[in-house]
Image (cartoon, helix red, strand yellow):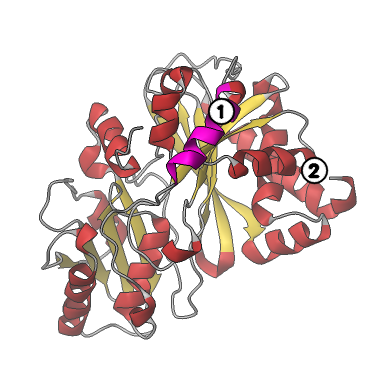
Amino acid sequence: MDDQPFGHRILSWAGQSADADRFVALGGSRLAAEPDHAALRRALDAAVARHPVLGEGPVPLRLVDEVWSAAAAGRYPPDAPCLLWAYLAGRELLLVAHHSVADPWSMRLVLREVLGPGSESTSAHRGGTTTHRPDRITRSLPFWQRLLTDVPALTPGTGGGTGTAELRAPSGITQERAAAVARSVPSTPFVVLLTAFARALAPLSRGEAVVPVLTYGRRRSDWNSVGFHMNVLPVRLGTPTVDAVHRAFAEAYAHEIPFPSLLEAVPQADALFAAGGPSLAQFEVIQVPDHPGIEPLTIPAGLRLGGPVLPVNGLTFWLEPATGGHYTACLRYHRSYRQTEMRALIERFIKRWEEIGVNPNRA
């Protein structure tokens, strides 16, 4: 069975599109006061020394006028000695790590460690992946072979373009509100948000869709480790009620195995998710550990850093934590779809979410 770390697999995908040195994870915070620069450098170097997966220090720290434009102008090669970079503009600190060795959860842990108390709870992590027992993988394969048979593609776009584009918009959804709606259904915030997405996707999905869901891929023992743990969990969705989506997600989650193992063991899977494969819709709610001392920065539109873990043959939709507990709705799409179609998808998602929130008993 393929035991290649998923971070290395996605690095090969990024390399195919010449974006390997722009394929990064981001984590930023607005600080209570401008930090002592020497102390900040020491804290950054200590974090890298503590987590060998990030390479070797010193961490490049640039003092800039504005963190986002400075970061967008940078390059982040995956073979650099240190795979963590930092930008400071007054009270705004932005950390950039290569995505093959870090995920959003890891970035929040590193920020927590660099900025103060609580760092002793973050543990060193070398491998960047979560292991699964071989017998679990063997038992799960028949499920995935069935689920990934005759996968329906999205309705083709009418844009006729090549490459990808990105949209970002305030969603009006807060983490607190998502949790409250989920309790009233009852389900989980993730399932309720996935249900809203499935309903919004209906005009493109012909009544059924296999949605690759990005999970944070961590067991409890990994919650305080730095590395790339994310996993891809394909979920087959039909009727987009909360109950039906909950059952579909729970069944897929019960059979979760490392995505590289899935690609190797299920012949049709590699072709489904490779560049140039069928048009699918990916979904993610970025999840990071809470920390009262971190006020996250909102990533601006048009940054062209980071990007989806899987190649975007159709579209990938994700919700990104922003300032004040709000989610930003983000959409990277293949230019075979028109921008107006994709803006309408975001608008439908927000409306479907609002409908669930107003009438949770009918969800």
Segment tinted magenta in the rendering: 133-145
Residue located at (31% from left, 42% from top): 5
Nearest the eye: 87 or 85: 85
Could you classify mark 1 by the number of other residues whose Cα lies within 10 Å: few (under 14), some (14-19), or many (20 or more)? many
Query: What residue appears at the point 73 percent right and 47 percent down from the top-left corner?
Result: 353
Task: Identify which amino acid the numbered label 2 is placed on.
Answer: Asp
Tag 1: amino acid: Trp
User: What is the secondary structure assignment of the residue under circle 1?
Assistant: helix
Q: CA distance from mark 2 to mark 1?
A: 21 Å
Q: Which mark is residue 243?
A: 2
Question: What secondary structure do most residues of the magenta stretch adopt?
Answer: helix
In the image, residue 38 sits, relative to residue 360, either above or below, namely below
The reply, left or right, for residue 194 in relation to residue 153 is: right
Q: Position of residue 109 (x, y in %)?
A: 38, 68
Label 2 crowd bin: few (<14), some (14–19), many (20+), radius 10 Å:
some
Up/down of 139 relative to 334, above or below? below
Q: Position of residue 44 (x, y in %)?
A: 21, 73
Q: Which quadrant is the N terminus positioned in?
A: top left
The residue that appears at 50% across and 25% down in the rendered structure is: 314
In the displayed structure, does residue 44 sit left or right of residue 150?
left
Q: Between tags 2 and 1, which lies in front?
A: 1
Q: Position of residue 270 (x, y in %)?
A: 41, 22
Q: Where is residue 349, by image quadrant?
A: top right
Residue 341 visible at all: no
| First in residue order: circle 2 vs circle 1 | 1
Image location of residue 332, percent across then percent down: 46, 35
Q: Give the camera-side residue of 358 and 242.
A: 242
Give the residue pinned by disc 1. 144
